[in-house]
Amino acid sequence: RRFIEKIWRIGQQFFKQKNSSVSKISVQKLLHKTIKKVSEDIEAMKFNTAISTLMILANEMESAFAQGSGVTREDYKKFLQILSPFAPHVAEELWQRLGHKKSISLESWPAYDLSKIQDAEIKIVVQINGKVRAEIMAQVDDGEDEVRKKALANEVVLRHLAGGEIKKVFYVKNRLINIVL
């Protein structure tokens, strides 16, 4: 019930906003990730995770409105389309308020933009002797040497390495780096 009420509040905020031509980048990125995830979850009949993903997107949209950035009409329409299998009455009502005469259930499923899904930066876990000690941000295309330099420059890592000799470094691309003393 609270989720449906939140969706209704987001709809009211959308209709109150001045026509926003730009969505917050985090909303756009999350929207396309959500379209992909919900599509896959519906196919696999994992409805709980699909709804959970929609809840995360709803929270992000609500925070975008709270910060005054808003959501574009196209992004809001896509949100309603992926919401409609789970909350058809609310989605249909908000869809009609957008000025559509045709039912939302007759619209085609939105496609996600692959370029908006891919992350430029990722979080890499830094372990020392198998224990997580820090997290660093690195570019997706960074090699082992760059990631190793960033890890060894981290203050927390330096504290844990104090007085120890590095015997081996294991690197799992875009996931973790483990420093063995």
Image (tube, rainbow, N blue to C red):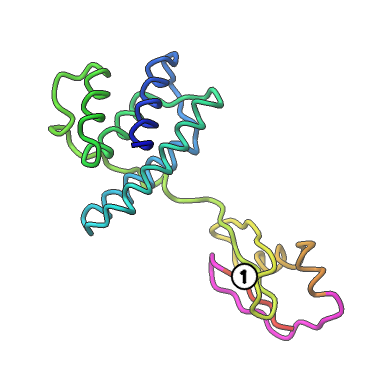
Count of number-bearing discs: 1
Residue at coordinates 33% horizontally, 27% vertically from top-left?
A: 74
Circle 1 residues within 10 Å: few <14, some 14–19, many ≥20: some
- Element marked by disc 1: helix
Residue that label 1 marks: 144
Relative placement, left or right, of 65 versus 94 is right
Q: In the image, what residue type sits under mark 1?
A: Glu
The residue lying at 31 percent from left, 50 percent from top is: 50
Expressed as whole percent of the image width and height from the top left, the position of residue 113 reads 35, 43
In the rendered structure, the answer to whether residue 156 lies left or right of residue 171 reads: right
Direction from residue 144 to residue 43 in the image, left or right? left
Using residue 150 as the reference point, say whether residue 123 is left or right of it. Answer: left
Q: Residue furthest right?
A: 163
Q: Is residue 171 magenta?
A: yes
User: Magenta span covers which residues?
Assistant: 162-175
Where the C terminus falls, by quadrant? bottom right
Residue reaching furthest to the bottom: 167
Question: Residue 165 sits in which quadrant?
Answer: bottom right
Task: Please provide percent x and percent y for residue 52.
Answer: 37, 48
Query: Which quadrant is home to the N terminus?
Result: top left
Residue appearing at x 65%, y 61% in the figure: 135
| Above/below status of 96 relative to 86 | above
**Residue at horizontal 55%, vertical 73%?**
172
Using the image as rendered, state which of residue 80 and residue 47 is in the foreground. 47
Question: In the picture, residue 43 is in which quadrant?
Answer: bottom left
Q: Please determine whether, in this image, residue 173 is positioned above or below residue 80.
A: below
Q: Position of residue 61 (x, y in %)?
A: 45, 33
Task: Decide whether the magenta segment is chiefly helix, strand or loop.
Answer: loop
Camera-nearest residue between 66 and 166: 66
Q: Position of residue 24 (x, y in %)?
A: 49, 31
Q: Is residue 60 magenta?
A: no
